[in-house]
Amino acid sequence: MFSLFASPLIYAADLLFGNRRQKQFSVTEAELHGWIERWKFVGNSIDKLLDPPQLTAAAATISDEVSAYSFDRVIICDRATIAQLLIANNVHFENSCAILSLNGYPAAIFDTVMQMLRRNSDLTVYVLHDATPQGISLIHTLKTSSEWFENQTLRYFELGLLPRQAIGKRQMIVNQSAVFVQEAELLPESVRQSLSKAELEWLDRGYYVELESFSPRRIIRVVTQGIAKSFEPNNSDTLVEFEENDWSNSSTYYADSFG
């Protein structure tokens, strides 16, 4: 069973003169949630819709016996809504991994899980994020932040979404924002050097793709396939190693396509 989440944009497609043409209907997040509340008010329910993730919570009590262990793998998302989706669908159980978001979700166990992760020098890190400046900087943030894995030599797997996985893909919903134009200009130099000319032009124009524009099924498939392929990355023609442009000795792989 998949748990769904709400996106602030709704899209529709139609056929015109035999050609597929996409129409975009922009809806604010407030309007969308207003419709949902009205739907519930008249007695309807949406069983698979997740409530907004809680980013503050009292620390959960975890026994010393449990916290003494660590994880071999962790999935880190740039936003709590995606981490929440994966956890709600038991991706952490099925893949024996921890799941966290960059902004501290799930709050009740975040600090404890981070302590457990730092104990494992052989930790493998998977990242899942939007195709935005913040998203594509996620690995750089994890490598260089003292709150994450600064000065640790780890293996990273870039599950997406990268601009190279979105450019030219007609089935993807590409948006544009002036805010992301400014953020692209502030990307760390090592991140910009890892991108192609086409990717930089795409980002500098403010283009972006949100993971919420994909079905939960596809997002979960990307994660499970990416983890499976990571066991033998050098034997897979679908995983490519980044040419590192920073001081880190960590190895980083990415997939050519998003699912």
Image (cartoon, rainbow, N blue to C red):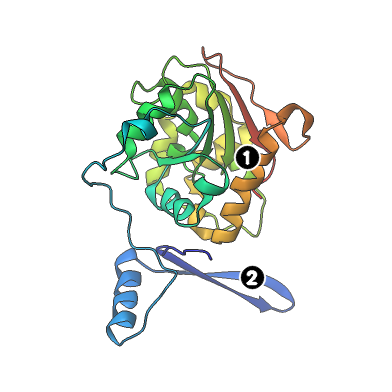
- x then y, percent, for residue 70: 45, 29
Q: Residues within 10 Å of mark 1 (few under 14, many from 20)?
A: many
Q: Is residue 40 left or right of residue 21?
A: left
Residue drawn at (33%, 25%) of the image = 147
Q: Residues within 10 Å of mark 2 (few under 14, many from 20)?
A: few
Query: Which is nearer the eye, 52 or 123?
Result: 123
**Quadrant in which residue 46 is drawn:** bottom left
Amino acid on which the number 1 mark rests in the picture: Ile
Q: Name the outermost residue toward the left.
A: 58
User: Eyeballing the image, is 258 above or below 28?
Assistant: above
Amino acid on which the number 2 mark rests in the picture: Arg
Secondary structure at badge 1 equals helix
| Disc number for residue 21 | 2
Query: Which is nearer the eye, 169 or 204?
Result: 169
Query: Which is nearer the eye, 54 or 204?
Result: 54
- x then y, percent, for residue 97: 51, 39
Secondary structure at badge 2 equals strand
Residue drawn at (64%, 60%) of the image = 171
| Disc number for residue 219 | none
User: Sequence-wise, which precedes: disc 2 or disc 1?
Assistant: 2
User: Eyeballing the image, is 258 above or below 196?
Assistant: below
Residue 197 in sight from this viewpoint? yes
Q: Which residue does the numbered mark 1 point to in the structure image?
A: 227
Residue 166 in sight from this viewpoint? no
Q: Is residue 148 left or right of residue 108?
A: right
Count of numbered circles in the view:
2
- x then y, percent, for residue 175: 49, 55
- x then y, percent, for residue 125: 52, 31
- Give the spatial CA distance, label 2 vs label 1: 35 Å
Q: Name the outermost residue toward the bottom.
A: 42
Residue drawn at (37%, 45%) of the image = 179
